[in-house]
Image: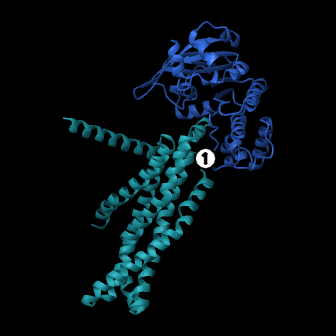
Chain colours: A cyan, B blue
Amino acid sequence: MRSIESLGRYIIRFLEEFGRIASLLYSTIKQIFTHPFDIKGILKQMVEVGINSLPVVLITAAFTGMALALQTYTGFARFGAEAMVGFVVAISMTRELGPVLTAIMIAGRVGAAMAAELSTMRVTEQIDALESLATNPVKYLVVPRFLASLIMVPALTVIAAIVGILGGYFIVVVVFGVSPAVYWHWTWVYTEWKDIYFGLIKAFFFGGCVSLLSCYKGFYSAGGAEGVGKATTSAVVFSIIAILISNYFLSALMFA
Amino acid sequence: MIEIIDLHKSFGKNHVLQGVNLKVDRGESMVVMGGSGSGKTILIKHIIRLLRPDSGKVIVDGRDMAELNEKELYKMRKRFGMLFQSAALFDSLSVWENVGFALLRERQMKESDVKKIAIEELKVVGLTGVEDLMPSELSGGMKKRVGLARAIIHNPEILLYDEPTTGLDPILANTIGDLILELKKRLSVTSVTITHDIQAAYKIADRIAMLFKGRIIETGRPDEIKNTTNPVVRQFISGGLAASGEDLEEVV
């Protein structure tokens, strides 16, 4: 009986939280179309989400592409399909690894910062101060972060995919001595446009997911310094879980 | 101007406000005193609808704050200025951007003009040469004064002060008290101040209300409060700043 009760409580808590996230999403979308348009705030966040995340995304993508090429080459060499490595790297980077790894990096770097900043503002009454100054905190704090992520995560994903493919090229062509023409030929022949734009749709979705969940965790935090710590940790954990679960369903939906 | 009617608010099992009734007239300076944890901040946050009541009403200028839609609420909030206990300055903005925040958001003035006005407001609260500093570079007293400048820059009709002198040394606390008095004369505002600083309360109040166990138990002019026979209020006054809710419980 007690376990049913606690299960019920858990479900109610989950539904409550889900409802609050949906409500924040609704307010965010509504505020995007409400005057004034804070272009300065959006550009500032685009620098934070995009430009400042570039080094970590570049390193991750390059080494992932290289490792992928190394492993695939070793396997494919067993049945003489080394020429196909470029294609495998390209399709993996555009469909899966580009969007997923970029989003995970953004969750760790930017999502954590968003949650920490907003939760600090919550516990130091800065969000109340915004309200008292007749400023909608969702418009001022969440909208720029949300829009910047929607734009910059796909942009970073494109860069990650290109760098990953170049990493693969380095391993296959420079290290293993496969002809560059062969590498590019099979990459171009089998990679389709839909691999690229489906990957970008995923990135767009992940960008929205990470920023919304991170802002949510920060916005509704409580309990001083401990609350800031909890909000930051759970923003990263929830974002990564959301990325990985939604990645499967988006993949199943788009590539089926 | 402000009328609080049978206001109740709970957080979980903690019934903080248990039927608060309070009326503040236009142009009046009302000070709400009470021990730590008595719900003073919760009360003041209801006035500007940073919190919504479980039951009861907050009426400002004839309008029930709970019934305002979002647009009306933000319009109403433009009539308020609020000084927070911790000053609540925006970390990412410089001092002048903090002070001029309300004007910058309205976007009807050039940034350079807003900066000039912000510098003038900073002078009003006794600060010069700090406009380009960041909040982290200011002392506690300076932060409070910047918070005060931010609260008054748009010439509000109602000022809410949450513990304006807490955490300040007696000289600075006195200075803030003088500033509040000066602002009252200059802007003819209606103000609600919550504090447990008795001296500050005597200095700035037209009337003082005592909040205890979630209710207002006594209201009167400062001289009436000084000579009250209510044992809780007497204990609070004689206990001074250190009086807490628990200390007062023993008196009841």
- Residue A139 location (% of width, % of height): 55, 46
Q: Residues within 10 Å of mark 1 (few under 14, many from 20)?
A: few
Q: B5 or A238, which is in the foreground?
A: A238
What residue appears at the point 50 percent right and 67 percent down from the top-left corner?
A155
Secondary element at image label 1: loop
Left or right placement of residue A73 versus residue B77 in this view: left
Q: B202 or A243, which is in the foreground?
A: B202
**Residue A88, above or below B197:** below
Left or right placement of residue A108 versus residue A243 in this view: right
Q: Residue furthest top?
A: B229
Quadrant location of residue A98?
bottom left
- Residue A24 location (% of width, % of height): 45, 44
Quadrant location of residue B231?
top right
**Residue B215, above or below A252:** above
- Residue B247 location (% of width, % of height): 53, 19
Q: Which residue is mark 1?
A: A36
Q: Chain of mark 1?
A: A
Number of dots carrying numbers: 1
Left or right placement of residue B135 versus residue A245 in this view: right
Image quadrant for the N terminus of chain B?
Answer: top right
Whether residue A190 appears in this view of the structure is no
Left or right placement of residue B236 versus residue A160 in this view: right
Q: B199 or A181, which is in the foreground?
A: B199
Residue type highlighted by circle 1:
Pro
What residue appears at the point 56 percent right and 26 percent down from the top-left corner?
B36
**Residue A75, above or below B59:** below
What residue appears at the point 81 percent right and 43 percent down from the top-left corner?
B128
- Residue B153 location (% of width, % of height): 73, 36
Whether residue A161 appears in this view of the structure is yes
